[in-house]
Image (spheres, coloured by chain):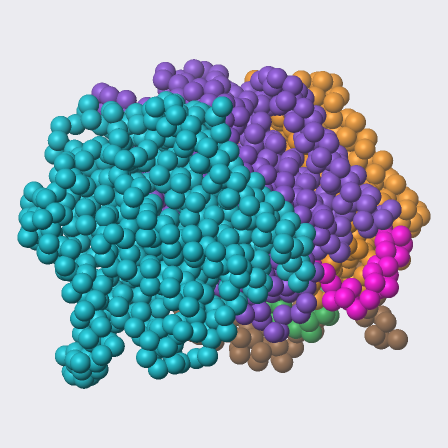
Chain colours: A purple, B green, C cyan, D brown, E orange
Amino acid sequence: MNILGLILFLLIAGGVAWAAERINPNAPRWVGLIAFIAAGAYVANAWAGGYAYANQYIEWIPRFGIHVILSMDGLSLMLTALTLFLGAVAVVSSWTETKRRTGFFQFNVLWVMAGVVGVFTALDLFLFFFFWEVMLIPMYFLIAIWGHENKAFAAMKFFLFTQISGLLMLFAILALVYFNYANTGSITFNYNDLLGAELAPDVAFYLMLGFFVAFVVKLPGVPFHTWLPDAHTQAPTAGSVILAGILLKTGAYGLIRFVIPLFPDASAQFANWAMFLGALSILYGGYMAYSQSDFKRLVAYSSVAHMGFVLLGAFAFLDAGDGAAGMNPLGMQGAVVTMIAHGFSTAALFMMAGALQERLHTREMSDMGGLWMRAPRMGVMTMFFVVASVGMPGLGNFIGEFLVLLGAFQANVPLTVAAALGVVVAAVYGLVLLQRAFQGEPNPDVPAMRDFGLREMTVMTLMMAALIWIGVYPQPLLDLSAPVIETLWITP
Amino acid sequence: MTSLAVPMEHVLLIAAVLFLIGFAGVLVRRNVIFLLMSLEIMMNACGLAFVAAGAKWGQPDGQIMFMLILAIAAAEVAVALGLVLQLERRFDTLDVDAASELNG
Amino acid sequence: MDLLWLVPTLPLLGFLALFVAGLFVSEARPLKWFSGIVGAGSVGLAALVALVVGMDFYAQGAEPQWYLLWTWMDVDGFTPSIRLYLDGLSLVMMGVITGVGFLIHLYATGYMWGEGGYSRFFAYMNLFVFAMLMLVLGDNLLVLFLGWEGVGLCSYLLIGFFHAQPENGYAARKAFVVTRVGDTAMLLGLFLLFREVGSIEVQASMAGARELWPEGSTMATLIALLLLGGAVGKSAQLPLQTWLPDAMAGPTPVSALIHAATMVTAGVYLIARTHELFLLSPTAQLAVASVGLATLLIASFTALTQRDIKRVLAYSTMSQIGYMFLALGVGAWSAAIFHLMTHAFFKALLFLASGSVILALHHEQDMFKMGGLWRKLPIPFASMLIGSIALAALPFTSGFYSKDAIVLASFDFAPAGWLFWGGAAFAAFLTALYTTRMMVITFFGKTGIEPHDHSRINMWGTLAVLCLLAIGGGWFGLAPVAAVLPDGGLGEADHTSAVALATMAAPFLGIALGWLLFHNRRINVDGLAASRFGDATRRFWFSGWGFDWVYDRVFVKPFIAVAHLNKADAVDFAYRIIAAVTRGLHYVIALTQSGRLRWYAANMAIGLLVAFLIVLDAL
Amino acid sequence: MELTLFYIAAAVAIAAAALVVTRLNAAHALVWLVVALLAIAVIFFLLGAPFAAALEIVIYAGAIVVLFLFVVMMLNLGRRSITRERLWLEPGMWIGPAILTAILFGEMIFLIASSDTGDAGSPVGPKAVGEALFGQYLLAVELAAMLLLAALVGAYHLGRRYLRDRREEAS
Amino acid sequence: MTGADLQALAPHLVLIGGTLALLLAISFVRSHVLALAVTLATLVATLFALPASNAAGARVIDGLLAIDAYANFFNALFVMAAIASALLGYRYLERRITLAHREEFYVLLLTATLGAMAMASATHFAAFVLGLEVLSISLYAMIAYPEEGQAPLEAALKYLVLSGVASTTQLFGMALAYAATGSMAFEAAFSAGSLLAVAGQAMILAGVAFKLSLVPFHMWTPDVYQGAPAPVTGFVATVSKGAVVALLLRYVVETGALGAAPLVLGVVIIAVVSMVVGNLLALLQDNLKRILAYSSIAHIGYLLIAVVLAASISGAPMALETGMVYLAGYFLMTLAAFGVMTVLSSEAGGEDAERLEAYEGLFWQRPLLAATLSAAALSLAGIPLTIGFIAKFYLFAAGAEGELWTLVWALVIGSAIGVYYYLRIIFTMTKTPAAEDVGEAREAAPAATERAGAWEAAAVVVALGAGIVVFGIYPTPIIDIARAAAQAFGG
């Protein structure tokens, strides 16, 4: 599987989409859609055809031992597939919403996704950081250009948070490489070479913290979450879909791929704090979600809560005896499944929010009400995805959250109990959302609105099917990530 | 070669005094012409210090630096006086404080 | 030939068909016939298959059967499988769910005919039946939990079925959230069980628990209490009972199916299913019995003061489930399930009959606006009457057999038998009292609103079948479940002793007093209620003993208040301060850029000065 | 003897320099500047650098100050400018700079005095200077030539415009 | 002076010859195009002379100038920046300067470049001072070059007077150092034991700090940037800064002046304060020239990480390499930013296109220019895909190598603040101008001016933008050259 080719394909498709605007303002959408479907088919084909670990290794900046190392294992594969799928969803969700500068819009969508694929596959720390930052800029443009009333502020906040945390990570990466260099005498950014780096415990702890903060900001975990509601509310629909569906996952991915394997002992030492932040995110995010009256803000805060589960599960280290810490496959798998399932459920809800805003020109739920009467299909779909995100068994989110809690319970009972209460809070905000927007007396001020058509229903149905599939038979996903998780915990 | 009677440190101190008088002039005067004269005093102080140091080591380098300073002073004064003329023309004054439109 | 999988699948298919149809058919042009046939038919077929499965089960010697569908997931030794388990207990439950469920569906085809969202209604109902079947058939606590949450969801959807009225939405949300509190406890129980035993398969983990722990072990108690938490929420027992009366906002068939016959008894099923765990913990059993008794009494008193006919029935349901809990707690396992079954019959009957009354009165539910209906609505009246005597447990009705067994068994309860027996018997008296009150006020006395009977054959036919079951359901007996559940010599209690006689007499006393109070008016009950103490008591009882009030003050109001206060997110405030400080610094430093040459020179001098200071400092 | 001469010259130089920065009339200040330069030339002489002393007088006092004088004359700074200068030069203005420079001076005394070797060195004759200048420092001289070229072009550009504008005004 | 010395000095000689030729050409024919052509020819010839100079091998000529790969790396940067400035300035002068007054500009440009080249090679106080003054004198005149308006004059005057104060301070410091050590050649001009020498070094560094516009010697910077005409500002921001940096690194390595603890402390303080204050000052600025001025304060503050690293013997190669790569990046992005400004200023009358409002909607009217300015801004912010990221990466690496964690932290904080105003520039360009909402018809209007615009300047700008991105993705060529030069440095 040619990963670099895949990334370049998306980048080039972005350029083509931009250029295509000169031919016809509608052309870029088709370019975007076809590009995502083609790329998705390529990945799906690799997955279906007895997927094998893919790896690419090209020299890049020899001065610092920097290489283009792109490799795709199970975890990367599923996240890449999710990325490409949600890319198509993002294109579809903005089909009629974006009327201006469609070319540049699709360009940005494609470039974000290319960056994300890079993030999910890069195994050279420099390259990883490279992609990590590259995906921000098009995202910034998406918010800043096509956003809503307060876009400048939101885009800036988004960028500042992620950029500042990124600088911390760059700092940590460099320090890690330097200390490894001091030990071994060779400069390398190769992930696999750095895995066994011997570090003094306190040094390892601070470096771990650098990575951790960067990823938790992106995740986002409380107390670094406040950029998310603003970014989401102001972003165009496609932006929200990408942001919630994919970009947050890069933070989760980073925790799983980098923080824990690179600094196993430091992570274990920090585990209780990380789990505490996870539980706090679940509760506080859920609570804040309840407090909101803006549809998108509510869903944004619910993302904080959901991603808290990832934090909780990923850091649920087990006691392996003798004071050593052991990996917790249950929690880790739960985190992975949560990532995927949350990608679908939240993307769908943001798509819904976007569709409502396009039709009603408001996100305030108090201006809605009784929409079920006017658009029953939208109502049903909202209900389904709300129920999914509330954690209904049989749907994807439940599997993730259950495994996380089950795993976390083995590690830290009080925090798990607190996190489990988040399930109740989830019910509160989820149902409030449904009720305020879709139930109750129809608001007489609301104009007649178009229900979902074939285009939207197709996408929604696909996401529904995905959630049910994960909820009923998650084994294919688990089988993909299981070998990866095993390798994460390397005892030197 | 006979040694000199004047200790270098004393010359350096004199130079420092001259330098600071010039500096004070730059800080106080508003008229550009006076600013430039103050600068000339500072330049001279530098030259004095170089010559003294060169004498101390018995090297010609100090005097050569003085000559270079001379050239620099001449060049600077030439351009600076050109600017003074323009200043008078465009601002109608020689007050440097008038030329503080660029700020923030 | 194993058809067990078909039983839950049929309603699921029904749901899917209705769901898909619902997406493409607007509510303005409903496919009523299609929806009705699919909705009721799928459950009917399921009932039929269940019957076949049941006969097959006994034909094969009543041995427990497993039926593996697929392994749900496999993570590091955690391998819950989707596997159905059939024994006497699940068979009875399956029978009740499909049988009573079918009857109620049938009734609903008539009842809901005039309402919007017909196909949506049956979609939800079918989904509910599916989830409930998964709950009772799953051999894995996770599958059970799937059903558990599924029925909760359907309950939510159906309570809020008429979603245009915001009150219904609130009631639905309340039901969902309150039960979720219990669910969370149950979830934690599962975690603990898995951590300790290493499995959450019901049979395997029960066997494991038996081996692992001696009787009275703390761990067993802890797990049992956590499971009890779940049961309490779902079954509307103290202290999570407050949602059930509000749940009456749903259409009446929903109340009959979910909030009387099936879902609310899931807690009873759960405890019966995990009885081996409870057997290991006398503390937990005492807790179960106490919860049951307390709920039983409080709900009975509350029922005594209600005005809304459905709320009377709701509190009655609570109290009857209290009986079941009591039975579970005192060790009368089979009696609990037995009462569960008979209660399903007569309470479904009562709800459906009251539904007919309500429908005839254009959705009027206040009993005090009814009256004198017995002549005008003979079929509902007869049905109500039969249901009531079964509820009051008059001899030879189904309710008698089951309730009698429970009350008598509680006398044998080790810690304080007479106390539990006394409470249970007193509650039987109260039950009869409020039942009589309800019947008298609704059907006798002055005529209130003029009724218009819309009953169709599918409605009164259903009532007739249920009447039969309410009367004769007792003859099913304890046999099917006795093989599964341990029974400490129950059913052989001495029916002639004073205790037994008193137990039997209690309902009659209640009826008599009720007749005197509410029909003959020999005792001035209104005057009593009007006195200061009486009024306070009445209002206290009417409000369900103030639970809602307390919860509102302690949980809901602060939650909402803080949410409003913190809408802008206090955490963000910190970042805003950082931003403001940075801006402030910018403005302050920008002041130094005054544009004045001499000021700039002065700063250079200061810089030089500081440089010298640093150099001198090094001396 | 030499030392006495040095102190006298130094005192003159400092006094003259102080007068330069405090005068109100630019022409007067220039005269004091010439005095200061002459005093410095004397010090150069005393330091055994007669060539430097000569250059100081010829180029500095002779050429550069005259350039100043031209401009002062050209700008016709008369009595009006003197009253303006008085206005600009309030006594209070001196306080800040005086403190600043005083502190700086204190620091400098400390720094210079701390390395007091008492060594005064030896005179360097014009020949040695000349040899070094056109030997080792040849490249520096070339660079100085380019410096003067740049100054020439710059002053030409600035001054030419001024003269042109004056002509246009006159006509 | 041997033949090899002359070969090594070839670029300088070519440049001087070209300057004289230009002067002659001007005195015979006043033709703007011809002046530009001679200038470009001279600069290109100089550029081609650089390899020849390199081929002569590293050498120090007369103890004044060291001609080595290090110096030539910077010389190449200066000459290329001069080429860019000449091309950018052409149309600007054409539109804004009277017919008879355009050509001297190129003479000054060439002499300024010569001064910068001398500084990159300087190993002696004399060469140091002279190089600096040749550069500065040329710049005074270039800044004051426009015939109208008060701003250029004010800028030039401030620059001249303050620079004069700084130069004299520096000269006095040199005199003190010379008095203490008896040598004016870098390698012997410092002794840590002598307080006089340390004080002298402090004064020299203060002078350098002024030229590099480090806090608290920074205040002239925004005013001069703002007052100077756009193409000159670009030149000032790059060549004059770059020359001083080149000199400073060589100076620090050769003198070992930062071996003295108080001096290191002073530099670290200056670095931290510059990073923070520079960025804070730029935060809410509305004038692009001033934003870039303030950002340059911060950027040179960042660069001091390399300077501090240069003080340690083992860190010197890395420090020099960092300085070279960083400056290469800095030249590209700064010139690109001022280039865009110049192109826009050349088209409009009145003041330069320096207000941020002037850039509203640029993305939609002039996508290439906007993309270049965006690339420059992102590069200045140090975002990947741009050379600025490589440069910042180098600083991090240098900081790690020297374990200068305080400075690296300051770098992180400074960059964090910086992101805000760089993004503001980009955001402004993406705004939909109010005019566009009125009707699509007006959108076409700016495109017309684009055709009539300064194409050669636009080409330069786009080339610079491409350079930012290309070297941002594949920096190895620059790294290799810089590394070789750093390894060869000092034998």
Q: Position of residue C335 (x, y in %)?
A: 23, 43
* E288 relative to D108 in the view: left or right: right
Q: Is residue A403 above or below residue A239?
A: above
Describe residue C568's horizontal placement relative to residue C527 as left or right.
Answer: right
Residue drawn at (88%, 41%), measured in percent from left and top?
E37
Q: In percent of the image, x 85 and y 48: which residue is there?
A: A24
Magenta extent: E429-454
x then y, percent, for residue C568: 44, 62
The answer, for residue A253, to whether it is visible in the render is: no
Can residue C463 be seen here?
A: yes
Q: Nearer the viewer, residue C120 or A293?
A: C120
Would residue C579 be found to the left or right of residue A264 on screen? right
Above or below, C520 against E456 in this view is below
Residue E62, located in which quarter of the rendered image? top right
> In which quadrant will I find the C terminus of chain E?
top right
- The residue lying furthest to the right in this view is E29
- Give the percent coordinates (x, y) of residue C549: 27, 68
Count of numbered circles in the view: 0
Residue at image point 67% right, 69% down: A447
Q: Is residue C517 left or right of residue A405?
A: left
Majority secondary structure in the magenta region: helix
Residue E356 x %, y % = 67, 60
